[in-house]
Amino acid sequence: MNPDLGTVYLQSAAAENQVEFLQIRFSDIDFVSNELCTTLFEVPWGEDQELHALSLDFDQDMLLQILARLGPEAQQQFVAQVNGQQPPFHVSLPEAVLVDRVTCVLGEEQEVEGEVFTPFVIQAID
């Protein structure tokens, strides 16, 4: 497993600042609850560009902003996949959504299935 980027930030002085990630491609979404979604990426980070795990959490309003970038047919396919499911569950988007800039703040440290990580919480997408 790759090191967690949120944990790296938590241990640095940068933890209090907003963080921007560029060229993020959303293709898979995990519904943690009715209010919370998350997605996981591998991103190169640091001087040696070592791959790190990047967890992005977002609410339903942000999910709607992401889905608005899908074409009408892909939106219908997404709704059909999600309809009737109760969290937690995983959905692959019918087509990837590329977002130029994702603005985040560092979330709270979490432990899931013995793994400790710190997600970033999306504040805005451009």
Image (spheres, grey):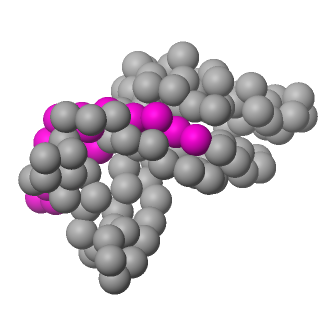
- Residue 20 is inside the magenta segment: no
Locate residue 70, reporting x and y percent: 79, 35
| Residue in the image at 36% along x and 49% along y | 55
Image vertical order of residue 33 relative to residue 90, above or below: above
Image vertical order of residue 66 relative to residue 112, above or below: above
| Residue in the image at 13% along x and 52% along y | 12
Q: Quadrant of residue 113?
A: bottom left
Image vertical order of residue 45 relative to residue 97, above or below: below
Per the picture, the main secondary structure of the magenta-coloured stretch is strand
Image quadrant occupied by the C terminus = top right
| Residue in the image at 43% along x and 54% along y | 40
| Residue in the image at 88% along x and 29% along y | 72
Q: Quadrant of residue 78?
A: top right
Asked if one can make out residue 13 in the rendered structure from this viewpoint, the answer is: yes
Locate residue 33, reporting x and y percent: 37, 27
Q: Quadrant of residue 81?
A: top right
- Residue 104 is inside the magenta segment: yes
Q: Which residues are magenta?
A: 101-119
Most extreme residue toward the bottom is 48
Locate residue 75, reporting x and y percent: 79, 31
Asked if one can make out residue 38 in the rendered structure from this viewpoint, the answer is: no
- What number of labels is visible? 0
Locate residue 67, reporting x and y percent: 69, 30
Image quadrant occupied by the N terminus = bottom left
